[in-house]
Amino acid sequence: MAKLTILEFPDPRLRIRAQTVESVDDELRTLIEDMFETMYSAPGIGLAATQVDVHKRLLVTDVTADRSDPHVLINPVIVEKDGVTVTEEGCLSVPGYFEEVKRAEHIRVRYLDRNGDEQEMEAHGLLAVCIQHEMDHLEGKLFVDYLSEAKRMRIRKKLVKGQRHRSPDAVAL
Ligand code: NI
C-alpha cells in the first residue's frame, strides 16, 4: 500500500468532474487500498478519488474511531434522501477549517462495491453526511462552496499563505 498526496484547496484539479468507472479491476482495487491508507493516516473519515488526483467516481469512508466500518462506493448515485442535519464539516483538502453545512440526514445510495457488484445502502447521520460530502468532491465541489463568498475567500487566502489551525478532536471528510 502507498500513501497518496491529497490535493488542497484552491488547487484547480479539485474542480474536475470525475468520470464513471468502467471496469472494477485490480488496478482500481490497489487504488482503493491506497485511498484507505491515505484516509486513515491523515486522519480522516472519508476520501474521494478526486482528492488524490484520480478523476474516477470512487470514494471510501469509515466514520468509526476504530476503523470497523469501511465502505467503498464506486459510481455512487443517491436514489432517495430526506431530513435535514447540520454538521460541522472539515475536509482533508481544506486542512484546519471547520464550518457548519446543512445536508440530508438520511440517504439511500446505489453503487458498485469493490467486486463490481451492484449494492444499495441506507445511511443516516454522519455516514450520510460523509457520503454526500465525498460525492460533492466527485462533482468538483467542496464544502467551502456552501459558505459565503467572503468566508471562502478568507479560507482560501489563509491556505495559500500556509496558515492552518487544525483542532485535534475534529474530523475531516
Ligand atoms: Ni472532503
Image (tube, grey):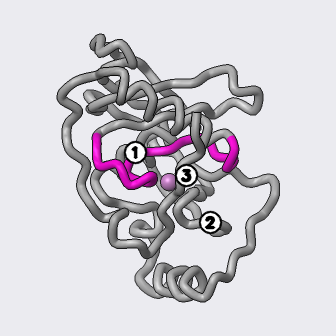
Disc 3/disc 1 C-alpha distance (Å) = 25 Å
**Relative image position of residue 115 (x, y in whole percent):** 35, 13
Q: Which mark is residue 87?
A: none
The residue tagged 3 is: 86
* Mark before the other along the chain sequence, 3 or 2: 3
Q: Nearer the viewer, mark 3 or mark 2?
A: 2
* Quarter containing the N terminus: top right
Mark 1 CB within 8 Å of ligand 1? no
Q: Which mark is residue 49?
A: 1
Give the residue furthest to the right. 168
**Relative image position of residue 165 (x, y in whole percent):** 74, 73
The residue tagged 2 is: 95
| In this rendering, position of residue 144 left or right of residue 65 | left
Q: Which residues are magenta?
A: 41-56
Mark 2 CB within 8 Å of ligand 1? no
Q: Amino acid at mark 3?
A: Val
**Relative image position of residue 11 (x, y in whole percent):** 41, 72
* Mark before the other along the chain sequence, 1 or 2: 1
- Which residue is painted at 46% across and 61% down in the image? 143
